[in-house]
Image: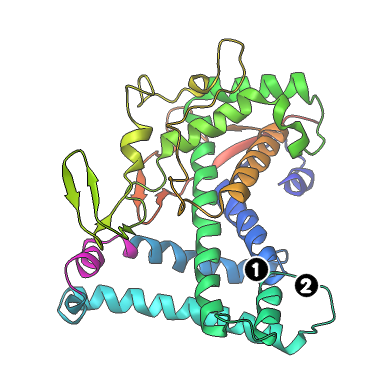
Amino acid sequence: MSKAHKEFKNPELEVNLAEEVEITVASVINQLLFGFSYSNSEERQKFVVLKNMLSEHMIKAMSPALSFISTVSSLLRFVPPFKKVFEGYESEYKFFINYFETQIQNHLQNLDEDEDTKDFTDAYLKEILRKKPGYNEKQLKHILYDFWIAGQETTSNTIIFGILYAIHFPETQKKVHQELDEKINSSRRISLADKNDLQYTQAFVNEVQRFVNLLPMNLFRTTTKNVSIRNFEIPEGTCVIPQISNVLYDENVFKNPMDFDPERFLDEDKKLKKIDEFIPFSVGKRQCLGESLAKMELFLILSNLFNQFEIKPVSEHNLPSLKKRVGVTVQPEKFTCVIEKRFK
């Protein structure tokens, strides 16, 4: 984006910021898993194809048809109209598995046990070569599927909604800019070392996570034993859903929960306060494995973005939609916005 500003010699630029965010986040997880990022035009084009398919894949995953198949009977996958939806989802799933198979084979061709490990796939393949029990290529493909998808959709969609909220509630963006000017006051790159100085910025990120309610249905769990809760008996093997939406929008915890208000996360001294009911990464032993990485990405990408740019709507009279497309995670509608450099 900075390069584009220089090329066009224009203080303001209309961009599809969502695409830049998606490629940035995808490059992070790709670097961790496979050792490369989407840095050149050819790789970026490949990513666009993958991303479009991934978005549809996530929407299908929460479709009524697949929900019936997973909760009522797997036999429904053979019955129209369930069959068509299931086959579409299965086809996309196999496409991704084949993509991961290609990455594994590329790694196997260049694998050297004596060299330093370059990425997760390298590390896992070395464990297979050491004959470690439970480690195999089939397992690796499914782990890569989970990590690759979870490492993209959740973080990128949260950041994109954060941009939308900054456009719709400009007074919050102004407060982020004021804090950045007071604490950073330069165009340098913001790091995690700056985090404690940026209390309002952290509160903004927290409120984005609460307000967006990224996983409205959350992921299914299964009880491992009989459980009694408030005189309700839940038998072993029951499918349960930790409905964190009810907590994030609980007006007894978050006053006026349908208002976007980062200051609800600040105490009287304007310091970030801990709220136990703030659980965007779910709860329990099976809560989000990527919580630490996601928190770092959300803070670093949003703080650096706001430090470099003011983000504005293309038209003050026609703000981009806040409508959510519902899938495994909620997805924003496509939009463009105007970015203006804050440092000349």
Image coordinates of residue 113 in percent, x first then y, are 79, 83
Residue wearing tag 2: 117
* Type of amino acid at the residue the image marks with label 1: Leu
Picture quadrant of residue 318: top left
Secondary structure under the numbered disc 1 in the rendered image = helix
Image coordinates of residue 104 in percent, x first then y, are 63, 82
Image coordinates of residue 82 in percent, x first then y, are 19, 73
Majority secondary structure of magenta residues: helix
Q: Name the colouring of the figure.
A: rainbow
- Residue at image location 45% in from the left, 41% down from the top: 280
Residue range of the region highlighted in magenta in the rendering: 60-73
Residue lying farthest to the top in this orientation = 268
* Type of amino acid at the residue the image marks with label 2: Thr
- Residue at image location 57% in from the left, 84% down from the top: 137
In the displayed structure, would residue 331 be above or below residue 231? below
The answer to which of marks 1 and 2 sits earlier in the sequence is 1
Residue wearing tag 1: 33
Question: Does residue 82 appear to the left or right of 334 in the view shown?
Answer: left
